[in-house]
Image (cartoon, rainbow, N blue to C red):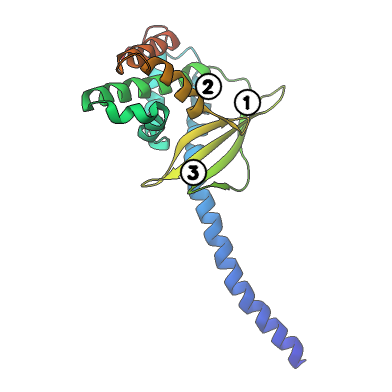
Amino acid sequence: MIAASRRFVIGLALAGTVLPALTVRAQETAAVQAPIHALYAALEQLMKQGQGTPFPQRFQTLAPVIDQVYDLDTVLRVSVGARWATLDETARKALSTAFRDFTIATYVANFDSYDGERFEILPGLRASGADQIVASRIVPAKGDAVRIDYVMHQNNGWRIVDVLLDGTISRVAVQRSDFRALLAHGDAEALIASLHRKTADLSGGTIRS
């Protein structure tokens, strides 16, 4: 009886240390995943609005969400690479504006209709250095799900610094390759002009940086 009581007390003590740790871990996971929940809620709303809502209106609806969930400054700086240090403040500001508009327009153009798709955030996180990766997938009403993971960085809150298609293909790495070619023969003007053209094409000419 005494031995059983000791085991019971020890069990309670261990539970008292394990449960708070699990609670803290769950809270940390929720904090990292929260921006993705916000992004997917906004994208679902965008899809349900559809093309019947003018592109500029959908753009303005999504813009504050992108600003909230993305660390666009970091994404752009890493995408540009070493050339970023050679750009003056005027060029950096112009490039940042063009890149922001292009990023938002890309989402608006690609999520422009709703056909029963759903967004799923998969359980748990995986570490990548100081960053955390949130795994998710977009599940269509018919056909195969698309795996999309997000690299999250803590900088005054968790925000997206890269997107991994199929869990492996880095959007930043692809952009870095594209940007390097445009920056190879001059200053940032060619890249800024390219982003402006792409934004105009995506928006049917309704968004011009």
Residue 24 image offset from top left, x and y in percent: 52, 60
Depicted 195 relative to depicted 42: above or below: above
Q: Give me the residue at 36% from left, 47% from top.
A: 156
> Which mark is in front, 3 or 1?
3
3 or 2: tag closer to the N-terminus? 3
Q: Are marks 3 and 2 in contact (CB under 8 Å)?
A: no
One can see residue 207 in this view? no
Residue at the spot of label 2: 47
Give the residue type at disc 2: Met
Give the residue type at disc 1: Glu
- Classed neighbour count for the residue bearing mark 2: other residues with Cα under 10 Å, few (<14), some (14–19), many (≥20): many
Q: Give me the residue at 63% from left, 75% from top.
A: 14
1 or 2: tag closer to the N-terminus? 2
Q: Are marks 1 and 2 in contact (CB under 8 Å)?
A: yes
Q: Give me the residue at 40% from left, 19% from top.
A: 102
Q: Quadrant of the C terminus?
A: top left
Q: Which of 139 and 77 lies nearest the eye of the viewer?
A: 77
Depicted 113 relative to depicted 122: above or below: above
Measure the alpha-carbon separation of dots 3 and 1: 20 Å
Residue at the spot of label 3: 34
Residue 117: numbered disc: 1
Quarter residue 59 falls in:
top left
Residue 127 image offset from top left, x and y in percent: 55, 48
- Classed neighbour count for the residue bearing mark 1: other residues with Cα under 10 Å, few (<14), some (14–19), many (≥20): some
Measure the alpha-carbon separation of dots 1 and 2: 9 Å
Q: Give me the residue at 63% from left, 46% from top.
A: 123
Label 3: state its secondary structure: helix
Label 1: state its secondary structure: loop
Measure the alpha-carbon separation of dots 3 and 2: 20 Å
Q: Quadrant of the N terminus?
A: bottom right
- Classed neighbour count for the residue bearing mark 3: other residues with Cα under 10 Å, few (<14), some (14–19), many (≥20): some
Give the residue type at disc 3: Ala
